[in-house]
DNA sequence: CGTTAGCCCTGCTGGC
DNA sequence: TGCCAGCAGGGCTAAC
């Protein structure tokens, strides 16, 4: 495949040159995911790793791109004369890099378990909350403890579990931990079934919007009635992130 | 070690 | 087709 990098920030701190060199002439052998990272495994045994962050978009596209399709383009991979994969990213937070086979095993140890995997359950969550004093929501967003839960899914999971986002993690009762681990799995499964959340920029690889945002119960719904008890949904800030909850269904810390 | 504030970016929205 | 402070699907770093 043939690669062009339009914005060196996407490969930083590595140079576009080394990025291109790692991809030049390679074939994608398989596609995987770990947490919020996309893993495109190459014939060389190295992996092209992509993180979309807030506004990144990865799209199958016809080549060459022109006009509006060039706006916010950060890099492009050509598979043939007229087919390729384009990475667009308005806010330029997205990252792409080549991870060598030798260090990949070590690299992924920095992430906690997959919430939909067998190793994540109430028992693991109980270990993770330990005696932590920080808010449970911040813990859910901590990728080194659980990999892949984002702001939307933290809010929606805590609502389903009936837990206030500011509750000190270590204060949760066993039954609450059970509820929360189940709520996380169910929330993620529902979101995947609806192909993700397109609040603004998210699109799948064919440019299609997800529909999970249509089913948000609290996220971005401040001032609206709680779908369960009709209380007014509140918005607060937790760990610098906008946080939405029902003050009646999710009791105070 | 755990926790938090500030920062990285660009574009949109809501209040004025 | 005003202006602009504040906010946004995330995560790193420094500082306590």
Image: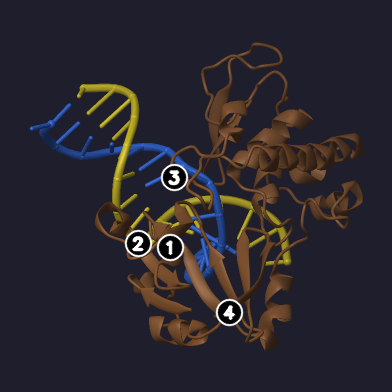
Chain colours: A brown, B yellow, C blue
Label 2: chain letter: A
- Badge 2 or badge 3: first in the primary sequence: 2
Check contact, mark 2 vs mark 1: CB within 8 A: yes
Residue under label 3: A201
Are callouts 3 and 4 both on one chain? yes
Q: Is residue A43 above or below residue A202?
A: below
Inspect this view and state whether residue A253 appears. Answer: no
Q: Alpha carbon of mark 4 to alpha carbon of mark 1: how far?
A: 16 Å
How many labels sit on residues? Answer: 4
Is disc 1 placed on a helix, strand or loop?
strand
Query: In which image quadrant can residue B1 be found?
Result: bottom right
Check contact, mark 4 vs mark 1: CB within 8 A: no
Label 3: chain letter: A
Q: Where's residue A195, x and y in %?
A: 62, 42
Is disc 3 placed on a helix, strand or loop?
loop
Check contact, mark 2 vs mark 3: CB within 8 A: no
Q: Alpha carbon of mark 3 to alpha carbon of mark 4: how far?
A: 28 Å
């Amino acid at each position: 495949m043939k690669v062009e990098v339009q914005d060196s920030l996407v490969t930083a701190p590595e140079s576009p040159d080394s990025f291109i060199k790692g991809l030049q002439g390679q074939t994608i052998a398989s596609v995987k995911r770990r947490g919020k990272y996309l893993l495109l495994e190459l014939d060389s045994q190295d992996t092209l790793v992509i993180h979309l962050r807030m506004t990144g978009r990865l799209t199958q596209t016809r080549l060459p791109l022109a006009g509006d399709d060039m706006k916010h383009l950060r890099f492009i991979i050509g598979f043939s004369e007229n087919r390729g994969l384009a990475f667009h990213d308005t806010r330029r937070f997205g990252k792409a890099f080549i991870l060598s086979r030798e260090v990949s095993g070590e690299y992924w140890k920095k992430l906690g378990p997959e919430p939909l995997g067998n190793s994540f359950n109430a028992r693991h969550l109980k270990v993770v909350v330990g005696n932590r004093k920080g808010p449970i929501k911040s813990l859910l967003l901590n990728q080194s403890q659980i990999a892949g839960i984002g702001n939307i899914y933290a809010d929606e999971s805590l609502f389903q579990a009936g837990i206030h986002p500011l509750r000190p993690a270590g204060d949760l009762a066993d039954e609450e931990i059970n509820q929360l681990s189940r709520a996380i799995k169910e929330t993620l499964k529902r979101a995947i079934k609806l192909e993700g959340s397109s609040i603004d920029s998210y699109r799948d690889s064919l440019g299609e919007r997800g529909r999970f945002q249509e089913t948000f119960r609290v996220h971005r719904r401040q001032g609206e009635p709680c779908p369960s008890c009709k209380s007014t949904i509140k918005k607060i800030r937790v760990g610098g992130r906008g946080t939405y909850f029902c003050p009646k269904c999710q009791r105070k810390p």
